[in-house]
Amino acid sequence: MLFNSSDFLLQFLPVVFLGFLLLAGLGWQRWVGLWLTASSLVFYGWWATSNVSLLIASILFNYTMGGLLRRRRSRLLLAAGILGNVALLGYFKYTGFAVEVLRDLAGANWAVPHIILPLAISFFTFQQIAYLVDAYDGAITEHDFLNYALFITFFPQLIAGPITHHREMLAQFDDPDRFRPRWDLIALGVTMFCIGLFKKVMVADPFGTYATPVFEAAREGGVQLIEAWGGALAYALQMYFDFSGYSDMAIGLGLLFGIMLPANFNSPYKARNVIEYWSRWHMTLTRFLTAYIYNPIVVAITRRRAAKGLPLPKRGRMTAGTFAALVAIPTVITMLISGVWHGAGWQFLIFGLLHGVFLVVAHGWRWWKVRRGLPLDSGGRVSMAGSVLLTFLCATVALVFFRADSVGAALDVLRGMAGLNGVTLPTPFQRLPGFAEAAAWFGVGIGNMPLFDAWLVIRIAVFLFVVWALPNSNQWLRDYPTALGLRVEPNWLQRYVPITRWRPTPAFGLPLGAVAIVTILYAISVAPTEFLYFQF
């Protein structure tokens, strides 16, 4: 069931919310938790009821293992728990890819098994691995089955995140101030949900209609300069508003039930380097990768180097060898795992590798500055704009691999962006006196461009301005609590334009309500499209 579908908007959500109001109004907090857990299982089973048993089995397994680890700190138990989760994820997500690779290497005629990927398996697997690790470390203070089941299944975050942490969620489930009708949070939740729905159906989906034909044409090859850039930028903006919209909708839905979810998206295209980019893009994934993959790798390497008497960082300074061992290698390994987590395919591996290289370069640049006593963030507005643009271009190049069906298709788009597949300009340029002759002299053709639309140029320009200049949804609502753990810096425009700061007043509510009604009517009148992160 999609957040932007009529089934969800007109049936599921109203019924679940009314049930919540009734139970919460009576003060039956425990029944509220049970109602939301059962509703979340119905939500999950809407696609395929067979997957519900898999989700329940995973919950039972990890809850049991967590209880055992709380009572007995055993590395063997922890390894068994982690291996069980990874094996489940590996079977459903990577078996087909592994067989395909082995078949190509062996030159055999093996049939690639068709295994349907259960929705959200990547997300709830990571959440439960984190739970087991923390149980082993003694960080689990509560072990209640209903709360744990709701922590995993809570439908606003079940399918595509945020990847929640037990500490931040279980505490809320036991808080008597939660799970009760709070009209301030409901107003915020409706606002956030409507903003996210608008981003999804009115902005992201139309960009997808431009990006999809370009990447489909790349399978055959020969996508030219303007079309390649149009497709790549359209997809970069589609992904931005699709994931941003989902994150807003998830947070808004949580607020309807008195629950605050962690922030997961904070204007990543405004980042000045790739380090900052990953602190703004899929923030809870970054948090998980840092805490449960990157940090353990660094600790293990540090201990090994210390045992061998090799140099370690001192007062933030390190040698080139130490930088390579403690920063570069763990970063690349972590981002390779991130790439594989996103999907089974060489293109996802390259996506992760690219971001690993980008991060190493960014950390290396900062290390070089520290060694020479230079400030980390220097330069004026022009320098900052250049940094933001370079970071955006790096992200766009990596997203080409993220979107393409294969490495070959991704490389064709990149060749097109570099002008190596030829350059053709649209036919209106023929009307310029002498232009066709001059263009031909430079090897530039003029003709029909079926993958190019002049309106796309305008849309890209408009929404890049929105992305870079206007306040995001969290900044618009910055005077009110929306997401956990989010420090919101004011947008420059909020100093001068009052409407860029939301207020719970009729002056804001009536226009927002009108836009919301139009958006909902449009959403239920067209075939709903999946959120891009649903495939993971």
Image: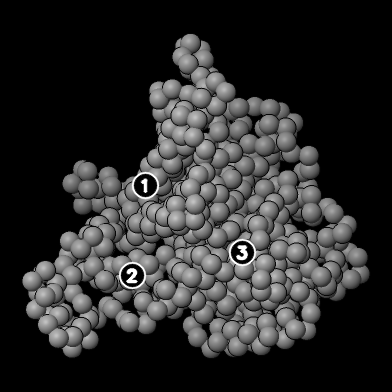
Three-letter amino acid code at disc 3? Trp
Q: Earlier in the sequence, mark 2 or mark 3?
A: 2
Q: CA distance from mark 2 to mark 3?
A: 31 Å
Q: Nearer the viewer, residue 109 or 272?
A: 272
Q: Which image quadrant is residue 406 in?
A: bottom left
**Does 241 sit above or below residue 87?**
below
Residue that mark 2 sits on: 231
Q: CA distance from mark 1 to mark 3?
A: 32 Å
Q: Element at badge 2?
A: helix
Q: Earlier in the sequence, mark 2 or mark 1?
A: 2
Q: CA distance from mark 2 to mark 1?
A: 20 Å
Q: Which image quadrant is residue 417 in?
A: bottom left
Residue that mark 3 sits on: 492
Q: Nearer the viewer, residue 64 or 193?
A: 193
Three-letter amino acid code at disc 2? Gly
- Find residue 396 and name its label: none
Q: Quadrant for the N terminus, please.
A: bottom right
Three-letter amino acid code at disc 1? Leu
Q: Position of residue 363 (x, y in %)?
A: 46, 38
Give the mark toward the camera: 1 or 3.
3
Total tally of numbered discs in the picture: 3
Residue occupying image coordinates x 55% and y 40%:
290
Residue that mark 1 sits on: 354
Residue occupying image coordinates x 18% and y 70%:
423
Q: Position of residue 212 (x, y in %)?
A: 35, 72
